[in-house]
Amino acid sequence: MLDEERNKIKDDIRVRTENLVSDWTPFVENVEDILRHIEMLSAEIDALDNKIGEAIGMIKNLRKILIKLEVIDDRFIF
């Protein structure tokens, strides 16, 4: 899905760039499209960062539980 969107954005930008003469409107639209795409990627990166943070929290919690249950010894795990 992301590749299709990226290819569509690239094609739109190419078409607009070919039509650049004295009117700056296509250039501005290209920049706006790129900024929208960057914003979308930034949101996806933030979502992945949240998932990674949640996973790390669950691992730390599991480690504490296993130490309390004496399944593992805390001297050997950092």
Image: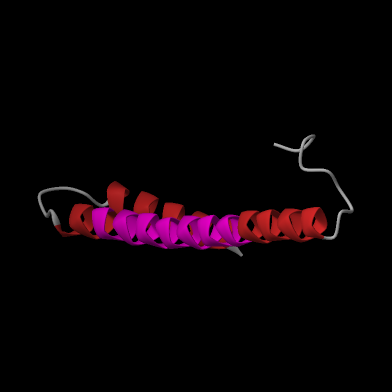
Predominant SS along the magenta part: helix
Residue 42 vs residue 19, the one in the foreground: 42
Residue 25's image quarter?
A: bottom left
Kindly identify the residue that appears in the image at 36 percent across and 53 percent down: 13
Residue pictured at 30% horizontal, 56% vertical? 35
Name the spot of residue 75 as percent of width and height, x first: 77, 36
State the image coordinates of residue 38 (x, y, percent, origin top left).
Answer: 37, 54
x and y percent of residue 31 in the render? 25, 53
Is 41 one of the magenta-colored residues?
yes
Quadrant containing the N terminus is bottom right
Residue sitting farthest toward the left: 22
Q: Is residue 75 left or right of residue 1?
A: right
Circle count:
0
Q: Residue at x 21, y 49 (%)?
A: 20
| 66, 23: nearer the viewer | 66
Instruction: Identify the residue shown where x is 46% and y is 59%.
Output: 46
Quarter where residue 74 is shown? top right
**Residue lying furthest right in this view?**
71
Quadrant containing the C terminus in the rendered view: top right
Looking at this view, is 77 or 27 the one in front? 77
Q: At which x and y percent is residue 18?
A: 31, 48
State left or right for residue 22 relative to residue 65: left
Q: How is the image coloured?
A: secondary structure
Q: Which residues are magenta?
A: 31-54
Q: In the image, is residue 53 part of the stretch drawn in magenta? A: yes
- The reply, left or right, for residue 26 in relation to residue 45 is left
